[in-house]
Amino acid sequence: MKILYIANIRLPTEKAHGIQIMKMCEAFAQNGAQVELVVPWRFNKIKEDPFEYYKVKHVFEITRIPSLDTVKLGHLGFWIQVVSFSISMFLYVLFQKTDVVYSRDELPLWFLSFIKKNLVWEAHTPRYNFIIASLLKRILGLVVISGGLKNFYEEKGAVVPSRVIVERDGVDLDQFSPMDVREARSSLNLPQERKIIGYVGKYKTMGKGKGVDELIEAFAAVSARVPGVMLLLVGINNDERKELIEKLHLATIDKKSYNLVGHVPQPQVPLYLSASDVLVMNYPDAEHYALYMSPMKLFEYMAVKRPIISTDLPSVREVLDDQSAYFVPPSDAQALSRAIELVFRDVSAAHVRATSAFQKAGYYSWKHRAQRILSLFRQSL
């Protein structure tokens, strides 16, 4: 089976979608498919080879096709780039023989839907307009990353339920695996004696908080009662550091009690997760997070076998339960501080929950995800 994966992205990119796309191409290929990833030519400050950057096996091909690189010109520039890539891609695919055309981008697929029916769209957000409605009537299948997204598109009545499959994001189990905490801390030059509370992700997305402010408030409360704790924030943007440091200062948190780490290459992320005693996902109770998201870091947290504390949201409950994680109400710093203290107070019980989450992680490997999606292709072709 030949799969043409279309991705209108800058490659490599430091953003999470680049990891997901590269890992899925690798996983499709590892399941026996012939895979070609088609991306636009774009200026890129990252000069590394994508396979090296993401530590992905060179088991598929990457083809770059022309497009106008106008993204930096703002909203209009963004759409000029999207349309130019879609047209260029249409002309490229016109002369390709392929069993399945797969993409997270609806506009290129909509262009192709007038000449091809072997199209699969992977949706990550609840978008719906004329183009999507038209596309959904003509595609081979729809892959969504949460039950909430499945409900969203089925309620629109534009897609046959039998053509929808829920496949949450995943994890590379070879890359993310349990590691000795002392070894991880030694590699990163982190203090061995501290109780480290870890968080991986941005401070804000689209100008909106992701629960880090409440985590700082909770940490301040914990540090007043539990000696030797440390807050490890990984993946913070450079333009976020000043504001974040001011928040930490206002919370009277000593500089020796926190460590802010900027963007790190994906292969280094497991070290930071393994260096932590507990890992926090403190998403706010916004519609996107509550119903539609499937964050890769959730599965990475699970795979390194560390206790997880998460806000109690339906999207997370699709994966974890009370036996595999600690849940707290959204925007409740006091509840979060109590959960952190509970992990440190009852290490044995925390280990049991971490082990339960780790055992679930195998289902969410990229390879198994690709295998299940390929089964959908074979049933529909």
Image (tube, grey):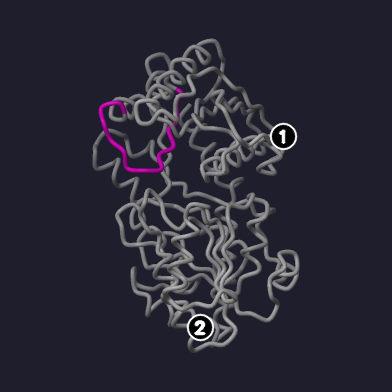
Q: What SS does tag 2 mark?
A: helix
312 w.r.t. 143: above or below: below
Query: On the image, numbered disc 2 is attached to which residue?
Result: 223
Query: On the image, numbered disc 1 is attached to which residue?
Result: 58
Mark 2 packing: few (<14 Cα in 10 Å), some, or many (20+)?
some
Q: Out of 166 and 276, give the one closest to the viewer.
A: 276
Q: Out of 300 and 253, give the one closest to the viewer.
A: 253
Sequence-first tag of 2 and 1: 1
198 w.r.t. 200: above or below: below
Residue 257, given in percent of the width and then of the height, sits at: 57, 76
Is 122 magenta? The answer is yes
Mark 1 packing: few (<14 Cα in 10 Å), some, or many (20+)?
few
Residue 134, picture quadrant: top left
Q: Residue at x 65, y 54 (%)?
A: 173
Residue 49, given in percent of the width and then of the height, sits at: 69, 34
> Would residue 328 be found to the left or right of residue 56 on screen?
left
Is 303 magenta? The answer is no
Q: Residue at x 39, y 70 (%)?
A: 214
Q: Residue at x 51, y 39 (%)?
A: 373
> Would residue 128 be found to the left or right of residue 294 on screen?
left
Q: Which residues are magenta?
A: 118-131
Residue 182, given in percent of the width and then of the height, sits at: 73, 73
Question: Disc 2 marks which amino acid?
Answer: Ser
Q: What SS does tag 1 mark?
A: loop
Query: Is the N terminus in the top left, top right, bottom left or bottom right quadrant?
Result: top right
Residue 215, given in percent of the width and then of the height, sits at: 44, 71
Looking at the rendered structure, the number of numbered marks drawn on it comes to 2
Q: Which mark is residue 274?
A: none
Q: Residue at x 45, y 74 (%)?
A: 326
119 w.r.t. 184: above or below: above
Question: Disc 1 marks which amino acid?
Answer: His
Distance from Cα at disc 2 to Cα at disc 1: 46 Å
